[in-house]
Amino acid sequence: MNYRSKTVAASVIGLTLEGMDIMFISFAMSMIIANFHIDMTKGGFISSITNLGMLVGGMVFGIMADKFGRVRVFTYTIFLFAIGTALTGLATSIEQVYVFRFIAGLGAGGEYGIGMALVAEAWPKNKQGRASSYVSIGAQFGVIIAALISAVVLPAWGWRGLFFVGIIPVIFAYLVRKNLDESPEWLAAQKQKRTAKKAEKSKLIQLFATPRTAATTAALAIMATVQIAGYNGLMIWLPSMLQQSQGLSVSSSALWTISTAVGMIAGMLAFGQLIDRIGIKLAYGIFLLASATAVFLYAYASGSAGVLIGGAIVGFFSNGMFAGYGALISRYFPVEVRSTATNTIFNFGRAAGGFSPMLVGFILQHYQMSMAMGYLAALYCISCLAMLTLAKKTSDGKQHNSISSVSKLA
């Protein structure tokens, strides 16, 4: 296996674990709510606190990865994630669940940015879109695995059993990363920095070094927030809502989840190819508008066929875009701050977007499902507007504003 393939494999495993863990919360949610006698809003906060942990972990481990190396820090994150996951299964109160999920979030927060930085530095620019999509489908593998495991484990061992089972793949992840070499581009940048002996600014400050850079960082953060808000809003609550509105069993809702995840995987692979062929911004424009339309119409889906097919279509567009963020953020920041930028921006999106399950839970508790889906559709429109403000990267590394014409998006 060559170095490019190794970076993809190591990153895919990390995203698989993360996707599996998120869906464990989704499938176990009703049991956790009943176990600790809490309402849906407090249940949604479990996901929110996990995402807050991801923001803190993303910033800390992103800075560490830029300073000490991608691979070494990559290994630290997986162990912290395992500890938090195991402790969740031992929680005796909802407050303990919050604390342990925050710990798991700290570890998971470093996974995405470091993995995407590794891939971006290993693959040429004209193939970064598809490479990023290969990594991103790992999260959907995790969704499918979680659906299958939940259908077996929940009836037999309850919600705690899910988190104990979730520790097992961590061992495999460690073995894959154990023999992974450091990023050659990062090593070269470190050598150049030592030779130049330049005074180094804070990594985080560099994300706001100029007004244009600050505006880019803000726009990317808005897009990441919408991506996570949409995903969490759909995947955390829809299985439970479909169980109520459509009378689906846990096994049937698992089938819906698998159908949606398959649509997401297809969307990611298509989006990765689209980025490399027509340009990253035009690809995002198409998928964001299609997501807004598909999510809004899905509120009116009925019957088993409508729910399954509609779920796959929503997944194709709404989460297909997840595949592009590694390539998108990497193109706007140099190697010396790439991991910090990717982790900070995307995990800010996770933290802010992580409150979406609480809001969706509130909407579902007081209004109809169509109101919640309308809220999600509006978010995708906001993300599209933020995307239009991004400057276009040119071959000489400079940027120019492309908001004036949609024809310049490619």
Image: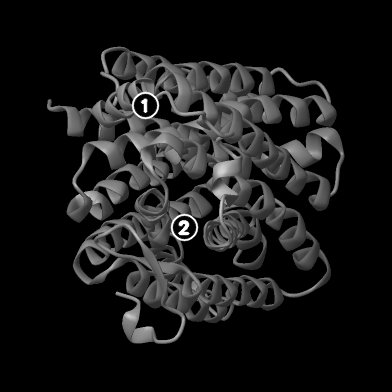
Please give the residue where the numbered disc 2 appears in the rendered image. 256
- Going by the numbered disc 1, the residue's amino acid type is Ala
Q: Is residue 180 above or below residue 382?
A: above
Packing grade of label 1 (10 A; few <14, some 14-19, many >=20) is few
- Going by the numbered disc 2, the residue's amino acid type is Trp
User: In the rendering, at what x and y percent does residue 315 appear?
Assistant: 43, 63
Residue most toward the left?
1
Location of the N terminus (image quadrant): top left
Rendering quarter of residue 103: top right
In this rendered view, identify the residue nearer to me: 196 or 38: 196
**Residue positioned 42% across, 55% down in the render:** 322
Instruction: Tell which tag, 1 or 2, sits nearer the viewer.
Output: 1
> Can residue 75 be seen in the rendering of this structure?
yes
In this rendered view, identify the residue nearer to me: 121 or 96: 121
**Residue positioned 41% across, 76% down in the render:** 285
First in sequence, mark 1 or 2: give its number.
1
User: In the rendering, at what x and y percent does residue 50 appear?
Assistant: 67, 37
Element marked by disc 2: helix
Using residue 406 as the reference point, say whether residue 146 is left or right of it.
right
Using residue 125 as the reference point, say whether residue 151 is left or right of it.
right
> Can residue 16 be seen in the rendering of this structure?
no
Element marked by disc 1: helix
**Residue positioned 46% across, 80% down in the render:** 403
Location of the C terminus (image quadrant): bottom left
Packing grade of label 2 (10 A; few <14, some 14-19, many >=20) is many
Please give the residue where the numbered disc 1 appears in the rendered image. 196
**Residue positioned 76% across, 54% down in the render:** 358
In this rendered view, identify the residue nearer to me: 110 or 67: 67
User: In the rendering, at what x and y percent does residue 71 appear?
Assistant: 37, 21
User: In the rendering, at what x and y percent does residue 393 appear?
Assistant: 34, 63
